[in-house]
Every structure is written in C-alpha cells, then in structure tokens.
Amino acid sequence: MSYKDRKVINIGTVSEITGLSIRQIRYYEERQLIFPERTKGGTRKFSFSDIEKLMDIANHMEDGLQTLEIKRMENQLKHRQLRDQMIRGQINAAFGMRK
Amino acid sequence: MSYKDRKVINIGTVSEITGLSIRQIRYYEERQLIFPERTKGGTRKFSFSDIEKLMDIANHMEDGLQTLEIKRMENQLKHRQLRDQMIRGQINAAFGMRK
DNA sequence: CGTGTAAGGAATTCTGACACG
DNA sequence: CGTGTAAGGAATTCTGACACG
C-alpha cells in the first residue's frame, strides 16, 4: 500500500538502522518472524514495516524470549483482534440499525 | 523526517520502480537534479521522494526539456513559493490580529 | 545533450558450515 | 537456541571512457 510496506531496502541498510547484525536479521527470517522479498538475483528486500517489526523483536529478545515465543505472542494478538472484530460484527448485525 | 525522505533505496531498485535506466539516474544526479546519499562504500541511497522526483523528471524529459531547463523550472517554482509566503507574512503582520 | 555499453574493480549479499554455549 | 565467523561465489554498484547523435 504505502511507502511503509514497500520492500525496497537492502539488508545492510536494515542492519544499520536497527542496530542488529546481518546474521541476526537472516536468522529471524529463518524463524519466520519476518518475510522479506527477493530480487531475481536473490538479495533480500525489506520494508519500513519489517524494520519496525525487527525493533520489536529485538526488544523481546532482550527480555529473554525465544523466537518461537515471540511468534506465539504475535499469533495470539492476531487471534484476539480477529475475535473482537467478529464480536463487534455480531453486535452490529443484531442491534446496529443506524446507517 | 518520515519514511518518504529516508535515503535507503539502492539504484537498482530505483531503476525498477521508475522504469529509468541506471545510467539515466546517475546522469540526473550528475546534473544536480537529485541528491542521493552514499554509504561508506560509495553506493548510492535514494528516498521515495527521490523516486517521485525522478518520475517528474522523466515526464519533463519526454516533453523534450533539457536537464538544465528542468532545474530552472524547479528554482522558479521554489522562488515563487517563497515570495508568496513572504507576502502572506507581511499581510499577517499588518492586519492579522487574530490569535 | 542524453544515453548505451564494455572494462575493471570494489562493495554487498548469499548459502552452508563449523564453533560456542 | 542464538549468533559470530571464515569460505567461496554470485549479484550489485562504481567510475571513467568511448560511441552516437
């Protein structure tokens, strides 16, 4: 959609901005915490969203969390949001008569 | 300031997005129409703003303008905006008593 | 003037592996 | 488990120059 989500940044630049090592960034991709795109040549391309997510991951790692735990937390958050959204939908269907 | 102005994109990616050749992009830099940053290693880094400017330049080039003419137009626009802003400032100083 | 291209070299990134813990 | 590193190779980028027009 916006600039924030366009995958255009090389791993070296991401490393500089986040302060994470290239090795760390690659590892978090391996653990499926981030999903960069690739050029035809195979070099990774990240978005600003990815960078924000990496900063988040870095914080969690500092707290002593494992990559798998971080992933679980994300999924839980996602599920909770989805559930709340559906509940709101039900409420609207039952009572929401305003245009 | 925002994502739009952070210089983080490699020339190859800029070329892909804009449809311009790498040669063309380097030339427009040489003519001082764009101002990418450099890494310590010397590779160019562009922002989304640079990309937008390049699309603009490409349109002007299609119209048969020379790089120098494009640069002049930009300067004229900048000067006009500055002038208008100063005029508005004068008006406010003379009549603007609202907080 | 604006752009393509071949040339040679340097910076950047990639993967798979070993190490340590 | 998470991360550093040396290894070898491939993709990316850089500059200065010649060409064409």
Image (cartoon, coloured by chain):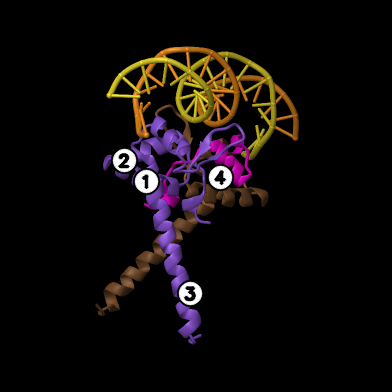
Chain colours: A brown, B purple, C orange, D yellow
Instruction: Give the tally of numbered discs.
Output: 4
Does residue B21 show up?
A: yes
Q: Is B84 in the magenta?
A: no
Secondary structure under tag 1 reads helix
Marks 1 and 2: in contact by CB < 8 Å? yes
Q: Which residues are drawn in magenta? A: A1-24
Residue closer to the observer: A45 or A82: A45
Q: Mark 1 = which residue?
A: B70
Name the residue rendered at 36%, 70% in the picture.
A88
Q: Name the mark on residue B61.
A: 2
Q: Name the mark on residue A1.
A: none
Q: In this rendering, which labeled residue sits more in front, label 2 or label 4?
A: 2
- Of all chains, the one bearing label 3 is B
- Of all chains, the one bearing label 4 is A
Q: Of callouts 2 and 1, which one flags the residue occurring earlier in the amino acid sequence?
A: 2
- Structural distance between the alpha carbons of marks 3 and 1: 29 Å
Label 2 is placed on what type of residue? Met
